[in-house]
Image (cartoon, grey):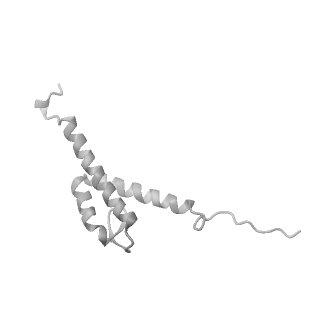
Amino acid sequence: MGSAASGDVDAKVLAAGRSACYKARDAFFQCVESSKGAATESGTVGLLYPSDCKHSRAQFEKMCRSTWVRHFDRQHCAKKRAQRMLEPETRSGPINIPQAT
């Protein structure tokens, strides 16, 4: 039960695949963060990225399962949304109105 002959994949192979996916993901999102170009290309779940990052996006999509790509795109968008909400100049909240005394 659970022997290599029954179709199980070696854990080292899976770990190497995950590692390659993570490296491609990190390279893509590093490109997105460091690029000064306008975000003109669209990924999954509404992610926009600069055309400078097309090659690293292609590598990311090649090295990772499509479900992982969507997951990482969602995760990145959620982090960016949270950062925008926490920035003082873009945060909306209660306005302090001076009281007349």
Query: Residue 17's x, y, as percent?
Result: 22, 46
Left or right of residue 87: residue 22: left
Q: How many marks?
A: 0
Between 35 and 97, the one lying in front of the other is 35
Residue at x 33% of width, y 62% of height: 44
Residue at x 64% of width, y 63% of height: 93
Among the 4 quarters of the image, the one containing residue 30: bottom left
Which residue extends farthest right? 101
Left or right of residue 83: residue 99: right
Among the 4 quarters of the image, the one containing residue 43: bottom left
Rendered position, 17 above or below 56: above
Among the 4 quarters of the image, the one containing residue 29: bottom left
Query: Residue 81's x, y, as percent?
Result: 48, 61
Query: Residue 99's x, y, as percent?
Result: 83, 68
- Asked whether residue 66 appears in the rendered view, the answer is yes
Query: Residue 98's x, y, as percent?
Result: 79, 69
Rendered position, 68 above or below 55: above
